Amino acid sequence: MAFLTKDDLKSELYEEVLESITRGDDTRIDTAIGLALGEAQNFLGIKYDVDDIYSKVGAERNTTVLRLIKDIAVFRLYGVLESTPEDIQTRYDSARRDLELIAGTAPKGHTIPLVGCKLKDLNVETDETRSISYINRAPSRNNYF
């Protein structure tokens, strides 16, 4: 069973709207879901074990990740149309921003943790063996009086 299915998208879109967008072609839904999972994996894979997150089904799934992937999938479904409704675009932008915050790649450097999700084993050096170097590119000041 997959992390996200067509039935999950019915909570975001009315069934008749989903049918009119896809024109009854479920491969469009599968493509949109695949694109959404891949897009989320680009962010989540930085810190989290994505295979563990995506292996969950039903009530075991992380609701935050599920919501974000649903919003991205709906945006990708609307991508076949000439225009995307403003609320769908807003939800997509919000989902991307939240994924950046989860990954820690947001412009201001803020981060939010995913509770209950397994972190990747990054094999990072410990604090004792890690060194930090600092290069100052500003010219030195010459104060001659």
Image (cartoon, rainbow, N blue to C red):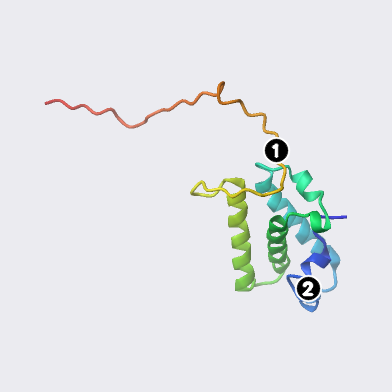
* Rendered image quadrant of residue 30: bottom right
* SS assignment at label 2: helix
From the image, which quarter does the C terminus lie in? top left
Q: At which x and y percent is residue 32? A: 76, 61
Crowdedness of circle 1 by 10 Å Cα count: few (<14), some, many (20+)?
Answer: some
Residue labelled with disc 2: 18
- Check contact, mark 2 vs mark 1: CB within 8 A: no
* Rendered image quadrant of residue 51: top right
* Farthest-out residue, top: 129
Q: Amino acid at mark 1?
A: Lys
* SS assignment at label 1: loop
Return the mark for residue 41.
none
Q: Residue at x 66, y 41 (%)?
A: 47
Q: Residue at x 62, y 53 (%)?
A: 99
Q: Residue at x 79, y 76 (%)?
A: 20
Residue 48 shown left or right of residue 101 in the figure: right
* Farthest-out residue, left: 145
Between the C-alphas of marks 2 and 1, the distance is 36 Å
